[in-house]
Image (tube, rainbow, N blue to C red):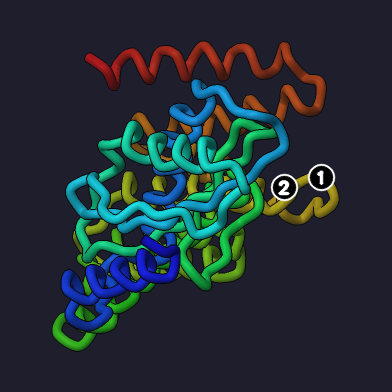
Amino acid sequence: MSTKLKSLLLLLNLVFWLGAPSWALSEAEIDEVLTAAEDKLSSTWARLQYPQSLSVSVQFMLLPDGGYSGAAVVGSCGNKSVDQQAINAVDSAVPFRRFSDSPFLVIATFDTKRDRVTCGMPGKGRGSSKADKKIAIQKKYHQNAISIVLDRIGKAEKVMGKDDIRLFESFFFLGGEYKKLKDYSKSEEAYNRALNILSKAKAATEAQKAKVLVALGEMYLDKGDTQNRENREKAEALFKEVTEMKEPGKEALASALENQAKLLYKDGKAKDAEPLYARIKELRAKTNQ
């Protein structure tokens, strides 16, 4: 069977499964599936024997249940034995990671020189390294989370009003997600929005406020306390405010003290930090009781 005919059969099989293209997985989720496939294929491929400096490309359909169908060589290395070993490697790698979506085509490139396999989708590029892919996946995850929460907040505000205390946790969560993306201005805005809601709510507690203050302070430190002294001063003021509260909650108080201790160590004041760590240990022991 010719390569073109095999590719056509793969495409027809894909149309049978899909009907019409309708992706439920995000790009980041697809990338996770492909990265997992790379790991399985590389593990299998590395155990085989083959001549050096050859490259084979195999196209197959990845199925939601972890299986595959229609593996075909679409980029021969010129050595039929090695081409077949690449096909065998696909079969030996089953089961692949399962996913909730329609099947999709994968092109796996087997490199004999590096004992490594790279996977992609026809016509779509991916990050050049595993680290790049991991970062991209994490970024997409946080972006998706933010999008979902913003949509829920918008709907909730229409029903409950913009200052309902039930929105506090949503804005607190947003602050953390923006911080992970290093979007510090939006992180600060979200944390301050949470604080503003608490300031207007009669049922708000000091523990709720303390939790936000600690997170906001840590955001300022994450933003940079060495080159920008103002960030450090803002963080220190927030941690101090928490330690001076009557009922900040054990966990928030311990976190505030820990941040203070770390800053003291950073300044070379280890002796001043030791009493703080002793108090932290005591607080966390009580929390775990």
Task: Please tell me the numbered disc located at residue 26.
Answer: none
Of helix, strand and loop, which one carries label 2? helix
Specify the amino acid type for callout 1: Thr
Residue at the image point whose x is 34% and y is 75% from the top: 150
Numbered tag placed on residue 232 in the rendering: 2
Q: Position of residue 69 (x, y in %)?
A: 26, 53
Q: Residue 249, how many percent across, how many down?
A: 33, 36
Please tell me which residue lies in front, 48 or 117. Answer: 48
Instruction: Quickly name the residue at label 1.
Output: 226
Q: For residue 82, say whether it is visible.
A: yes
Q: Which residue lies furthest to the right in this view?
A: 227
Q: Nearer the viewer, mark 1 or mark 2?
A: 1
Asked if disc 1 and disc 2 are in contact, CB closer than 8 Å, the reply is: yes
Q: Going by the image, does 87 lie left or right of 57?
A: left
At 36% from the left edge and 64% from the top edge, which residue is drawn? Answer: 6
Under tag 1, what secondary structure?
Answer: loop
Q: Quadrant of residue 23?
A: bottom left
Answer whether residue 238 is visible to the viewer in this image. no
Q: Which residue is drawn at 73% across and 22% down?
A: 265
Q: Dot 1: few (<14), some (14–19), or many (≥20) neighbours within 10 Å?
A: few
Nearest to N terminus: mark 1 or mark 2: 1
Residue type, label 2: Arg
Quadrant position of residue 179 = bottom right
Q: Where is residue 129 in the image (x, y as percent from the top left)?
A: 64, 47
